[in-house]
Image (cartoon, helix red, strand yellow):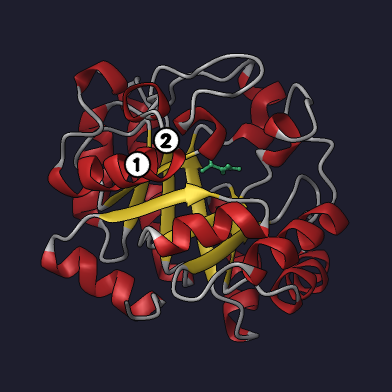
């Protein structure tokens, strides 16, 4: 297997070969996912919820993200590893540079930031300083208190258009990947078609260039609840390695996500 990079991910989009992605927070699972041929591993700030038992991602700190990034990257040979910048760690461009440096030094190959237009200067600055950036639009969990819950985004025409405009602006500012969370399938398709960079969906329907799931959701072991867009792959396969293999095959063949795991 060859090392995954921003250019190989772009080539996958161009060839229509789906990108497979999972979250990972430690060396053992990162190694298992890497060996299974998962393309992208995200050290997500979802660790606040699935590892720490918090109600949201807001309490997660940059030190915790750097620690888990260091742990996860130890297990990886080929997968592309990106790490989340946690809540308020990129409130100003200067803060973003300093904190992104901690994640890159811990082994991340890209950092992920949640938000649209307000982030353009920060993204341009990071890219100029050689920090690859992934955008995150749609349901942005760090904004859960502004949104009023973990809800599907972009159902109204004006909000859908704003999301498309933000996605185009992020690409122009230099993001090389976009995570699109919890939007109707039609909007997932539109954003994916409008952008040249790969779009990785989670609850964004089957037309995005790839799919990502929180690993605990994919194994059906999340403490609190299972999002509609996720699927428990462990029940049928009965084994962690088989579950990951099946998830990967289903994403590549387009079996996952079905309409049952998508929004209209
Ligand atoms: O933190 C995370 O796990 C994420 C995924 C939901 C994409 O951002």
**CB of residue at label 2: within 8 Å of ligand 1?**
no
Give the crowd class for mark 2: few <14, some 14-19, many >=20 residues within 10 Å: few
- For mark 2, give the secondary structure: loop
- Give the labeled residue for mark 2: 239
Which x, y percent locates residue 247? 31, 40
Ligand 1, what quadrant?
Answer: top right
Residue at x-position 77% and y-position 55%: 65
Residue at x-position 25% and y-position 53%: 209
Q: Quadrant of residue 229?
A: top left
Which x, y percent locates residue 84? 65, 54
Q: Is residue 172 left or right of residue 133?
A: left
Eyeballing the image, is 254 above or below 3? Answer: above
Give the crowd class for mark 1: few <14, some 14-19, many >=20 residues within 10 Å: some
Q: Is residue 94 visible?
A: yes
Eyeballing the image, is 162 above or below 221? Answer: below
Cβ atoms at labels 1 and 2 below 8 Å apart:
yes
Along the line of sight, which residue is nearer the eye, 53 or 132? Answer: 53
């Amino acid at each position: 297997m060859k090392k995954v990079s921003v250019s190989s991910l772009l080539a996958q989009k161009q060839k229509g070969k789906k990108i497979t992605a999972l979250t990972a927070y430690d060396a053992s699972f990162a190694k298992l996912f890497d060996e299974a041929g998962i393309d992208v591993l995200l050290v997500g700030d979802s660790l606040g919820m699935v590892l720490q038992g918090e109600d949201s991602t807001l309490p997660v700190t940059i030190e915790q993200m750097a620690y888990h990034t260091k742990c996860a990257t130890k297990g990886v040979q080929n997968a592309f590893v990106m790490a989340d910048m946690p809540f308020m760690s990129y409130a100003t461009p200067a803060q973003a540079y300093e904190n992104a440096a901690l994640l890159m030094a811990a082994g991340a190959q890209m950092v992920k930031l949640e938000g649209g237009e307000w982030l353009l200067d920060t993204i341009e600055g990071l890219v100029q300083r050689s920090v690859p950036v992934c955008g995150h639009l749609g349901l942005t969990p760090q904004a859960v208190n502004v949104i009023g819950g973990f809800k599907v985004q972009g159902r109204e025409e004006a909000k859908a258009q704003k999301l498309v405009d933000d996605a185009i602006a992020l690409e122009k500012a230099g993001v090389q990947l976009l995570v699109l969370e919890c939007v109707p399938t039609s909007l997932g398709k539109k954003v994916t078609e409008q952008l040249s960079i790969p779009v990785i969906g989670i609850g964004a329907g089957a037309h995005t260039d790839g799919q990502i799931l929180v690993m605990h959701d994919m194994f059906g072991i999340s403490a609190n609840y299972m999002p509609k867009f996720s699927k428990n792959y462990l029940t049928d396969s009965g084994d962690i390695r088989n579950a990951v293999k099946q998830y990967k095959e289903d994403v590549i063949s387009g079996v996952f996500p079905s309409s049952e795991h998508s929004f209209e």
